[in-house]
Image (tube, helix red, strand yellow):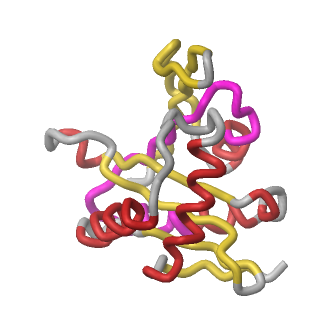
């Protein structure tokens, strides 16, 4: 499997929107419950670029297989040293090292980002595959937020995982 990691471009937004809707909105991997549009993703992407935050894509055989970014964790100034990581893979890309390549490149960006000391990932407690992936990438569990969200008729617990980068 030939994987190319590069910066996201506007032409990637339709595929990124589809992946997000299928894997974030339609599952408990994220607590988002509203589909995104290409226009929504365009605004999001422009904000990330304007804030000098990386938005990386993985191409497999010329097709978008996933994307990853880090973004501001919380506002208020004091949190500027921490960024939240997001990674979304299309189903065919899972289990083939695509996520590892994306996250490795994202971590390299974070280590070079003078603003950052920490990366944080918020993961549903039942998403054992993602928890294991983040652990293998060096993240450690630092807390749980029980019943922090409600989706698909059930209460959700979030796991916070952190990686020191600075």
Tell me the quadrant of the picture where the N terminus can be found. Answer: bottom right
Find out whether residue 121 is within the magenta segment.
yes
- Expressed as whole percent of the image width and height from the top left, the position of residue 22 reads 65, 51
Q: Is residue 42 left or right of residue 134?
A: left
Let me know if residue 162 appears in the view: no
- 86 above or below 54? above
Where does the magenta region start and end? 105-130
Residue in the image at 64% along x and 25% along y: 125
* Quadrant of the image occupied by residue 159: top right
Foreground residue among 2 and 63: 63
- Expressed as whole percent of the image width and height from the top left, the position of residue 27 reads 65, 38
Residue in the image at 42% along x and 47% along y: 84
- Expressed as whole percent of the image width and height from the top left, the position of residue 88 reads 61, 56
Find out whether residue 59 is within the magenta segment.
no
Q: Farthest residue toward the left?
A: 77
Residue in the image at 35% along x and 61% along y: 44
* Quadrant of the image occupied by residue 70: bottom left
Tell me the quadrant of the picture where the C terminus can be found. Answer: bottom left
- 8 above or below 150? below
Foreground residue among 6 and 117: 6
- 45 above or below 132? below
For the image shown, how many numbered marks are present on the structure?
0
Residue in the image at 37% along x and 49% along y: 83
Let me know if residue 81 appears in the view: yes
Foreground residue among 24 and 5: 24
- Expressed as whole percent of the image width and height from the top left, the position of residue 137 reads 65, 51
């Amino acid at each position: 499997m030939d994987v190319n990691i590069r910066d996201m471009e506007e032409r990637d937004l339709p595929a990124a929107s589809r992946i997000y809707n299928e894997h974030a909105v339609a599952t408990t991997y994220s607590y988002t419950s509203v589909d995104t549009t290409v226009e929504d993703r365009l605004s999001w992407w422009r904000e990330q670029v304007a804030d000098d935050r990386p938005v990386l894509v993985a191409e497999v055989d010329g097709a978008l297989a996933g994307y990853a970014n880090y973004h501001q964790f919380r506002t208020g100034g004091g949190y500027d040293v921490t960024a939240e990581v997001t990674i979304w893979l299309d189903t065919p890309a899972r289990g083939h090292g695509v996520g590892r390549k994306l996250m490795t490149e994202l971590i390299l960006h974070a280590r070079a980002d003078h603003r950052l000391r920490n990366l944080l990932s918020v993961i549903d407690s039942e998403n054992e595959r993602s928890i294991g992936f983040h652990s293998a990438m060096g993240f450690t569990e630092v807390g749980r937020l029980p019943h922090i969200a409600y989706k698909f008729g059930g209460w959700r617990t979030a796991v916070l995982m952190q990686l020191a980068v600075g």
